[in-house]
Image (spheres, coloured by chain):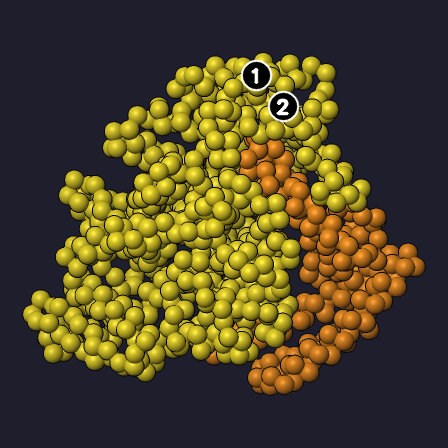
Chain colours: A orange, B yellow
Amino acid sequence: MADHFETLGVTPSFRLDEKALEERYRELTRLLHPDRHAAGGPTARRLALEKTIAVNDAFRALKDPARRAAYLLKLRGIDLGEAGAQGAGRFLPPAFLMDVMELREAFDEARAAKRTADVEKLAAQVRGDRARALEALGAAFDRNDDEEAARQLSVLRYYDRFLGEVRAWEDEAFEENHG
Amino acid sequence: MAESGLLQIRDPLRPYGKPVGIDLGTTNSLVAYVDDAGQPHAIPVSAEGDVLCPSVVHYLEDGSTIVGREAREKAATHPHETIASVKRFMGKGPNDAETQRLGHYRFAQQPGDAIVRFDVGSKIVSPVEVSAEILKHLRRKAEAALNDKVGGAVITVPAYFDDAQRQATKDAGRLAGLEVLRLLNEPTAAAVAYGLDRRAQGTFAVYDLGGGTFDISILRLVDGVFEVKSTAGDSALGGDDFDRALAEALLEQISPALGRDLRADPYAVQAALFAARAAKHELTARESTVAVLPLAERRVEVEVTRAQFESLIAGLVQRTAVACRRALKDAELTPAQIDGVVLVGGSTRLPLVRRFVAEIFGGKQPLGDIDPDQVVALGAAIQAENLAGKPREDMLLLDVIPLSLGVETMGGVVEKIIHRNSTIPTSAAQIFTTYADGQTGMDIHVLQGERELVQDCRSLARFRLSGIPPMPANMGRVQVTFAVDADGILSVSAKELTTGVEQSITVKPSHGLTDEQVEDMLIASLENAEEDVAVRLAAESKVEAQRVLNDLHKALKSDAALLAAGEREAIAAAEEKLAAALQTHDHDRINLAISDLDHASSEFAKRRMERAIQGALAGHSVDEFGE
């Protein structure tokens, strides 16, 4: 079976033109979507469905830099799993884990005390850290340093998980006010 | 090439009848079509020219039905025999919260039932059967008005409908004798009607508050492609709830004076709901009105002001903000980045709702100039024409799955396999390992929802895999593939990886009908209608045969160069067999001949598809190949 890069006909690389990728995706979708083959025979309809699923899945895996990095690493033999921080622990430096523990404590305190402004401040800080990790991830790929890329991706995923928890907390608070 | 002559039988532009779009609504349903000039129109369903058909079915003593306005008029005198708002029960189980709300239904549950059933006096019916009566009615009205056969339908569903609700809707379509071309999400349908009308570009929010459901979808429109970025909603929130809130307040207010609990009286409940709905409509344009309840003792009149009504429903309207916020966040957009807001659904006529929407989207005045009751049906008609009539080359709808799909794992935890707002069609594969020596079967519990625990998500189905080759524990590795099609409906397939053996799967829907049950209902309904089952099934097969032949002839004309040696002869032979089969009413024989023809031409079809893909990947534009 074709890998996601082949499906979309692009060279496997972390640095890719996201706009061109999207155009390619749209072009293939226009061609293959089941709606385009609704008047076709059973084989054409089945193929249209299968191919469109492959194109959708490939685009989803490649359009987002973090997912693209994970997929690229997987092709190169480092499997960090689909998402989340599981399996990523082995790449994380101890100093980072200490920082994360502090961050988490601060978050728990602010959350328990419902200090929304403090949570927002922490989130902004983590977003900045995430942007730096993303840059370092790109730089590691440029040097073909897969170990370092795996490390940066693991760090980035940690931040994403943290930001996900912040969002869940905000969502909950909002829902309480609009229940 | 050799023409078989079959093509000349009908107008080649629409060989299978007229495609229609159907908005199967909680309160009202509509059917629409696209005229020869490409304009969509709602079809009148009453002698007075109304296009709205109340989604109400009344069952007579002999089990036959009345649908629409006449049925609604029976509701006051026959609350149990008259089913309104059936959409709220689609895909629901007997213990669902929906059955506990204020209403005038008489439920009839048999032990072990997976779905809601109503006792309508003359018989017991499921929501799928009730919906099918509405669809049949619309089909008959459309056929009379268009003086043509209805050749397939796009039926709209709330974007936030889960798998069970979608499947139930599709089953209803099939039971009504319609070829369901596609289930289309209501906000997407509305966007189509607006977008094509104005040739709009940009990012839009569609706020759809109907009789029973609420949806919010964020879409991006680029060059005729309608790309849904995110969707959220509440499939149990709508104008019905506004009526109910006011009806409850009225009943509570009146009960003491009459010395009895009116909420226990189905006639009083029905009268209050009716009065509440009328008052709601009045209060859209006026500051106050009088609700009139003709009760058994006497006629009671209660004054209701807009302010009172708005305070009763404010909490319900507020609830829509949760979904709006979530849809925006999932699309990674702020209200300021939305170019326009489209209002859909009768409930968006309420001034409170309009003010609220303007506030949520940063003061932008929402668009509501296409009739909010009609816009969904018009969009559905455009998509129906696109699929089964004259396709519009530039138009494509890309929708998403509204709720995450997951499987139950150890400890009652749900592991997500397909995330909400993934573009459909899509798929995901998961590997399960056998845990016992010689294990040959496996149960997989599929759920839909965002929460972590099984009890907080909605159970869709249990899939029982069997036929795993016996192996030591942990050696059997079964890859299960979950695929969601363009209707948003899930299917599952499984394969043991070590041996490559495919597993057979038995599906036990948690809140739905099995394929066999739908088949039985279909046959029973045809027998009741004294229609010849064989002729009807043959007619369906013949439509499919025409489609296959049409497509094949087009392909042979444009891509004959791609035929391999001997292929043309094999295709011609299979075609001849199909032509012979079409002279009969034997649907098994026709289906077999279709399948043989498809088989004979399948390599050719693959080559055509591959060539098209290679063309696109080589950087050609879409227009440079094909015809």
* Element on which disc 2 rests: helix
Instruction: Check disc 1 and report the residue beneath it.
Output: B574
Residue lying at 59% horizontally and 69% vertically, measured from the top left: B339
Q: Quadrant of the N terminus of chain B?
A: top right
Residue closer to the observer: B386 or B232? B386
> Pointer 1 and pointer 2: residues touching (CB < 8 Å)?
yes
Residue lying at 55% horizontally and 38% vertically, measured from the top left: A38
* Element on which disc 1 rests: helix
Left or right: where B502 falls relative to B542: right
Chain letter of mark 1 equals: B
Q: Is residue B284 above or below residue B271?
A: below
Instruction: Check disc 2 and report the residue beneath it.
Output: B601
Q: Residues within 10 Å of mark 1 (few under 14, many from 20)?
A: many
Chain letter of mark 2 equals: B
Residue farthest along the front direction in this orientation = B37
Q: Position of residue B424 (x, y in %)?
A: 59, 49
User: What's the distance in space between the residues labelled 1 and 2, CA to CA?
Assistant: 9 Å
Q: Position of residue B518 (x, y in %)?
A: 37, 37
Which quadrant would residue A41 be assigned to in this image?
top right
Identified by mark 1, the residue type is Ala
Q: Residues within 10 Å of mark 2 (few under 14, many from 20)?
A: many
Q: Quadrant of the C terminus of chain B?
A: top right
Q: Position of residue B2 (x, y in %)?
A: 60, 17
Q: Is residue B130 visible?
A: yes
Residue closer to the observer: B477 or A6? A6
